[in-house]
Image (cartoon, helix red, strand yellow):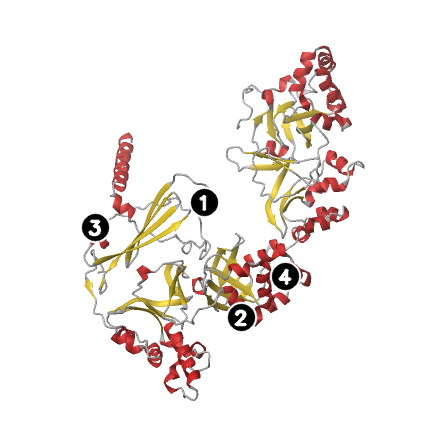
């Protein structure tokens, strides 16, 4: 048996060595897709799928010693771009990254070098030389292509309607006879020309009828011909741009007299079986056939006619009468200026009818409140171009918007498309800086609602009622960039006796308690341990406590209240839900003891032991405070010992004090641990009760300025200590 095991490890080691012995070039040029399945870095998932793959990027395939791009008839094209990344943090800095992508028709390596704020990006493209293609097997590009001019190539692709349109504006002869000039054409297939709305010039004359234009008024006929010519030339650009020369979000200026543009995008789209296929779009129209080479250029066949693109997203919105509400919002929010600049956006544009269907009060807020305007627009705006062709049928997709939230995109069997629950009623309207889709409903984020509305939506009713009662509603709604720690309704129903007494104390104003829940700044609550937030209650700050035990997530409390839900947005505030009502501390832990008659005897003993002054220091301290009833249960011998010996009394008090801040929520996370001096801690797991030695915590989290007090029902005696007294916390 031992021999078999020995041979197993020998063979395992040999296999591993063989895998790792692959030449560096082979690993460097391993085949992979750009940006994985995130649609070229768009954070756009074509459908829900597990995010965990246990083997990481391990490639167990055998690699060959030769690579195809080192064979014959492979041409190299190099592009270089320089840009400055200088900022206020000057210093000596250098970094270099290299990434390579082996595609079917090209091999592309991109090298980025940044030295002291100057960034140089060099792209080296290896592809088959013009007139050649790769064989099924073997290296290089050894298959010679029989090429003809663009017109003959277009005829062979049955692009007769495009040629007819080109002929009508005098373009066909140039495409056929040019020898030195090279062209790239995005040629619509014949079926695209059946949609006559694409073929109308601005003067309602079809481009296919240009030869029949009646020249009643030469100036007008010239305008008509020029207009139609621009439509055709909007499909043509100079040079040979094969797929390998194109990249995602690339903008191509066409031969159109107004320099209209074509935006190229690439997507990895999943089919119904979950298999991915790379698709290419030009102005969001799907490219049906790529890289059809001719002697004087290349043809990419597109699904539809490409309308000339001249307008920015802002200009597009302004030109649509049914988008007047959105136009107003863009103007008031100043985002209209940004959407006139270069970029790569997707704007889901709600129609006027969509806005009119909203609640009047909500409509007034999102169209007039400056704090909400940007948030409502950003919820409809994506930082990348997502064409409808990228959305798979009968699958859910999601992508990030400018609010850093995710929106869901779907396409049903009837080809109806939705963003969230809003239907896309007109799609793929191209702009110079992105694409616009019309939708029939406004997508309202939490960020567009006021604080009180969000509390109501989250069923935080009791806290909201008290805000109204304390006359703080208007102050909260008018404030900007605040943080609210909102107790749940359950938090009010499970308040401790100490908290109830403090809340109902005639000397404590309700407003003071509620203001203690409001921080005058926006906070994500990802602060370090013992960090203090200022509050609207000017007298007291809030303290964050963070703790972590092996096998558990980080746990945060705010004044011993656990944070149930983080970062709920509203128009002017961030809301964190908490499981306890926050009561402003009345003083140190000794003040907490003094405020409750149940601890009068224990406080007297603290003073007699000489430890009172120490407990008024900064701390933090955690005090397990026996009630008067618990102390009365001590035997006569134990009582006399504490009365007769200051040393015994001090030792007794110290058994009930821990140097550090321990909330009940932290102790409850332990499977087992030890208190100071080895007293065992065992969470009871029911009603937040925790066993300490032979005692239980009967009331939790009476917070002071320098620590926290927990009431216990029985004193902790010396015999309660655990033999593992050198450990503060340990796992059992």
Secondary structure beneath dot 3 equals loop
Q: Residues within 10 Å of mark 3 (few under 14, many from 20)?
A: few
Residue found 37% across the figure and 68% down from its top: 254
Which residue sits at x=30%, y=56%? Answer: 103
Label 2 to label 4: alpha-carbon separation: 19 Å
Q: Tag 2: Cα neighbours inside 10 Å, few (<14), some, or many (≥20)?
A: few
Q: Is residue 322 above or below residue 205?
A: above
Helix, strand or loop at mark 2: helix
From the viewer's perspective, tell me whether residue 694 is left or right of residue 86.
right
- Give the Cα distance between marks 1 and 4: 37 Å
- Circle 3 sits on which residue? 66
- Whether pointer 3 and pointer 2 mark residues with C-beta atoms closer than 8 Å, the reply is no
Q: How far apart are the alpha carbons under marks 3 and 2? A: 57 Å
Q: Secondary structure at mark 1?
A: loop
User: Which image quadrant for residue 595?
Assistant: top right
Q: Mark 1 against mark 4, which lies toward the viewer?
A: 1
Asked which secondary structure carries label 4, the reply is: helix
Residue under numbered circle 2: 319
CA–CA distance in space, label 3 to label 1: 44 Å
* Marks 2 and 1, how far apart at CA: 39 Å
Is residue 634 found left or right of 354 in the rendered image?
A: right
């Amino acid at each position: 048996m031992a021999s078999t095991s020995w041979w197993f490890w020998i063979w395992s080691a040999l296999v591993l060595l063989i895998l790792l012995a692959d030449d560096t070039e082979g690993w460097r040029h391993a085949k992979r897709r750009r940006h994985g399945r995130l649609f070229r870095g768009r954070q756009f998932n074509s459908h829900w799928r597990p995010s965990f793959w246990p083997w990481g990027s391990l490639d167990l395939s055998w690699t060959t010693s030769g690579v195809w791009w080192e064979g014959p008839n492979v041409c190299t094209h190099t592009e270089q771009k320089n840009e400055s990344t200088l900022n206020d943090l000057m210093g000596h800095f250098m970094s270099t990254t290299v990434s390579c992508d082996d595609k079917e028709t090209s091999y592309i390596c991109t090298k980025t070098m940044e030295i002291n704020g100057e960034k140089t990006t060099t792209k080296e493209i290896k592809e088959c030389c013009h007139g050649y293609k790769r064989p099924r097997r073997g290296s290089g590009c050894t298959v010679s292509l029989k090429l003809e001019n663009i017109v003959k190539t277009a005829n062979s692709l049955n692009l007769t309607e495009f040629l007819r349109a080109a002929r009508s504006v005098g373009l066909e002869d140039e495409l056929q006879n040019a020898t030195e000039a090279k062209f790239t054409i995005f040629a619509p297939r014949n079926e695209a020309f059946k949609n006559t709305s694409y073929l109308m010039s601005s003067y309602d004359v079809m481009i296919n009828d240009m030869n029949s234009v009646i020249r009643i008024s030469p100036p007008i006929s010239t305008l008509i011909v020029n207009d139609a010519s621009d439509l055709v030339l909007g499909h043509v650009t100079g040079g040979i741009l094969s797929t390998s020369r194109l990249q995602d979000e690339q903008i191509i200026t066409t031969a159109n007299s107004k320099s209209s543009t074509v935006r190229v995008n690439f997507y990895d789209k999943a089919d119904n079986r979950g298999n991915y296929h790379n698709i290419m779009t030009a102005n969001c129209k799907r490219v049906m056939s790529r890289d059809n080479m001719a002697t004087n250029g290349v043809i990419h066949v597109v699904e539809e006619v490409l309308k000339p693109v001249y307008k920015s997203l802002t200009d597009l919105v302004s030109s649509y009468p049914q988008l007047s509400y959105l136009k107003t919002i863009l103007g008031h929010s100043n985002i209209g200026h940004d959407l006139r600049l270069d970029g790569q956006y997707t704007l889901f544009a709600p129609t006027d009818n969509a806005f009119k269907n909203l609640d009047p009060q909500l409509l007034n807020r999102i169209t007039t409140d400056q704090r909400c305007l940007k948030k409502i627009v950003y919820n409809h705006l994506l930082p990348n171009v997502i064409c409808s062709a990228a959305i798979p049928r009968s699958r859910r997709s999601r992508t990030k918007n400018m609010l850093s939230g995710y929106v869901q995109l779907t396409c049903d069997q009837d080809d109806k498309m939705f963003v969230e629950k809003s239907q896309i009623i007109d799609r793929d309207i191209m702009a110079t800086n992105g694409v616009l889709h019309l939708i029939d409903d406004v997508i309202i984020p939490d960020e567009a609602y006021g604080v009180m509305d969000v509390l109501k939506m989250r069923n935080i009713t009791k806290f909201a009622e008290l805000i109204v009662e304390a006359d703080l509603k208007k102050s909260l709604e008018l404030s900007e960039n605040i943080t609210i720690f909102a107790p749940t309704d359950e938090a009010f129903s499970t308040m401790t006796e100490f908290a109830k007494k403090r809340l109902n104390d005639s000397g404590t104003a309700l407003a003071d308690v509620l203001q203690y829940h409001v921080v005058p700044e926006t906070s994500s609550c990802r602060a370090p341990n013992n960090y203090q937030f200022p509050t609207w209650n000017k007298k007291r700050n809030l303290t964050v406590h963070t703790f972590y035990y092996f096998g558990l997530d980080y746990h945060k409390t705010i004044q011993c209240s656990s944070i149930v839900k983080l970062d709920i947005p509203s128009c002017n505030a961030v809301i964190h839900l908490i499981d306890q009502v926050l009561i402003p501390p009345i003083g140190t832990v000794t003040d907490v003891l003094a405020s409750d008659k149940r601890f009068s005897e224990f406080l007297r003993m603290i003073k007699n032991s000489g430890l009172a002054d120490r407990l008024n220091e900064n701390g933090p301290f955690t005090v397990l405070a026996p009630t008067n009833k618990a102390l009365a249960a001590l035997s006569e011998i134990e009582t006399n010992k504490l009365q007769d010996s200051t040393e015994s009394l001090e030792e007794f008090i110290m058994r009930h004090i821990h140097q550090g801040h321990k909330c009940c929520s932290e102790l409850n996370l332990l499977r087992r641990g030890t208190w100071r001096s080895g007293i065992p801690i065992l969470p009871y797991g029911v009603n937040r009760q925790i066993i300490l030695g032979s005692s239980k915590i009967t009331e939790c989290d009476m917070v002071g300025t320098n620590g926290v007090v927990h009431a216990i029902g029985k004193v902790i005696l010396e015999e309660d200590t655990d033999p593992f007294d050198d450990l503060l916390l340990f796992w059992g």
